[in-house]
């Protein structure tokens, strides 16, 4: 079982790595013979979208890694649901490119809806994976222990908060992206620490 879990982690790490690498291809080399400095500055939406999505993919990888350190065995259902989550990860470069291309245009709101919607779906998939692991008894510790309950609470907030980001897009693109960034930072915090911060 350990080798099977290791294969799932290795495959997942590869997907995360490829998705993060693909992000940079949205940044285009300015044409020769033109004002290089001006053209580089014009691409600020691409730089912003690249950095933001790279951080998001990195944070998803961190949470995926933390989750798999708690798993003692794998089954077919885990394989399928993990693949669905990875499908969400592989999609990230597309909305990133759309956001980069349209952030400074009248289509910014539509592009941001697509971008924030991608992370809303990913948060839902993380919850599906986590609850499957819980209900199938795939953890290496009691599901009623404090660390596991802390993770459950932190994950349960995800879809709700990402839905807030998604709906905020209608009122303010900048605010929705700011909230999305704050959420990403929140999910870098271990669940036990996040629970302590909420209690304060």
Image: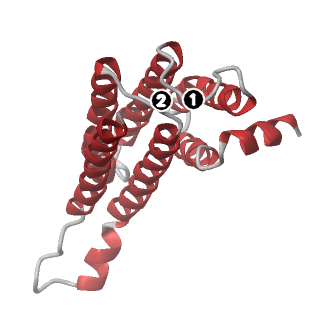
Tell me if I can see residue 95 in this picture: no
Out of 108 and 136, give the one closest to the viewer: 136
Q: Residue 95, percent across and down?
A: 30, 41
Q: Residue 113, percent across and down?
A: 40, 32
Name the image quarter holding the N terminus. Answer: top left
Please give the residue where the numbered disc 2 appears in the rendered image. Answer: 123
Residue found 33% across the figure and 47% down from its top: 99
Out of 161 and 197, give the one closest to the viewer: 197
Out of 162 and 39, give the one closest to the viewer: 162
SS at circle 1:
helix
Please give the residue where the numbered disc 1 appears in the rendered image. Answer: 158
Out of 161 and 130, give the one closest to the viewer: 130
- Within 10 Å of disc 1 (Cα), the crowding (few <14, some 14-19, many 20+) is many
Q: Residue 16, percent across and down?
A: 32, 49
Marks 2 and 1, the one that precedes in the sequence? 2
Residue found 46% across the figure and 46% down from its top: 65
**Pointers 2 and 1 in contact (CB under 8 A)?**
yes
Residue found 12% across the figure and 77% down from its top: 31
Residue found 46% across the figure and 39% down from its top: 68
Tell me: residue 57, above or below residue 125: below
Residue 122 lies in quadrant: top left
Residue 146 lies in quadrant: top right
Most extreme residue toward the right is: 200
Query: What's the distance in space between the residues labelled 2 and 1, CA to CA?
Result: 6 Å
Name the image quarter holding the C terminus. Answer: top right
Tell me: residue 6, above or below residue 33: above
SS at circle 2:
helix
């Amino acid at each position: 079982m350990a080798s099977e879990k290791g294969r799932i982690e290795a495959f997942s790490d590869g997907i995360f790595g490829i998705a993060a690498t693909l992000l940079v291809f949205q940044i285009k080399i300015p044409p020769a013979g033109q004002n290089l400095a001006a053209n580089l500055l014009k691409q600020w939406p691409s730089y912003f979208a690249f950095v933001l999505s790279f951080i998001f993919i990195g944070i998803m990888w961190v949470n995926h890694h933390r989750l798999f350190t708690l798993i003692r065995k794998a089954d077919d259902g885990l394989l399928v649901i993990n693949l669905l989550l990875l499908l969400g990860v592989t999609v990230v470069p597309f909305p990133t490119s759309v956001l980069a291309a349209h952030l400074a245009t009248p289509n910014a709101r539509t592009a941001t809806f697509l971008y924030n919607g991608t992370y809303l779906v990913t948060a839902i998939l993380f919850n599906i994976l986590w609850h499957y692991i819980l209900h199938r008894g795939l953890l290496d510790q009691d599901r009623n222990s404090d660390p596991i309950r802390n993770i459950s609470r932190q994950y349960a907030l995800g879809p709700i908060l990402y839905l807030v980001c998604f709906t905020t897009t209608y009122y303010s693109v900048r605010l929705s992206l700011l909230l999305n960034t704050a959420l990403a930072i929140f999910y870098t915090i271990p669940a036990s620490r996040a629970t302590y911060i909420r209690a304060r």
